[in-house]
Amino acid sequence: MAREDEAMPDIADVTMVDVLRAVADPIRLRIVQTLADGRAHGKCGEHWDFGVHKSTMTHHFRTLRQAGLTRTVVAGRTHTIELRRDELDIRFPGLIDALTGHAAPPD
């Protein structure tokens, strides 16, 4: 049975300041952009070859989770990371699109 990581804050407690602080780092922004495709990605898969040590990636994943951007789902020995896209789109409409470059141009 899969379980979600307990360190993830409730979406009501997620602040714009924390989200923007988390994505201010270029690697964390790239992680969010990668996750925005809607698929869950493994913690140590090939998608995370950003040229930094595994421990540094662990720090980035933790920062995104604590800021409320991602969730880690654990199923046995498998850990997957998902963007909390639906929740974030409700809490901060248009934010993820703006971060991923998919925002609609102004009229």
Image: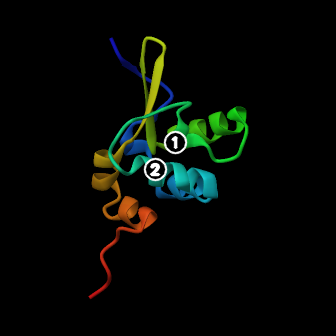
Location of the C terminus by quadrant is bottom left
Query: What residue is drawn where x is 35% and y is 16%?
Result: 2
Quadrant housing residue 46: top right
Crowding at mark 1 (Cα within 10 Å: few <14, some 14-19, many 20+): few
Observer able to see residue 20: yes
- Front-lying residue, 45 or 102: 45
Q: Amino acid at mark 1?
A: His
- Circle 1 SS class: helix
Outermost residue on the bottom side: it is: 107
Q: Position of residue 51 (x, y in %)?
A: 70, 46
Say which residue label 1 marks.
Answer: 47
Q: Is residue 39 left or right of residue 25?
A: left
Say which residue label 2 marks.
Answer: 34
Outermost residue on the front side: it is: 46
Q: Is residue 39 left or right of residue 49?
A: left
- Circle 2 SS class: helix
Report if the CB atoms under discs 2 and 1 are less than 8 Å apart: yes
Q: Position of residue 71 (x, y in %)?
A: 43, 34
Q: Position of residue 63 (x, y in %)?
A: 59, 41
Location of the N terminus by quadrant is top left
**Dot placed on the residue nearer the N-terminal end, 2 or 1:** 2
Quadrant housing residue 66: top right
Query: What residue is drawn where x is 35% and y is 58%?
Result: 92
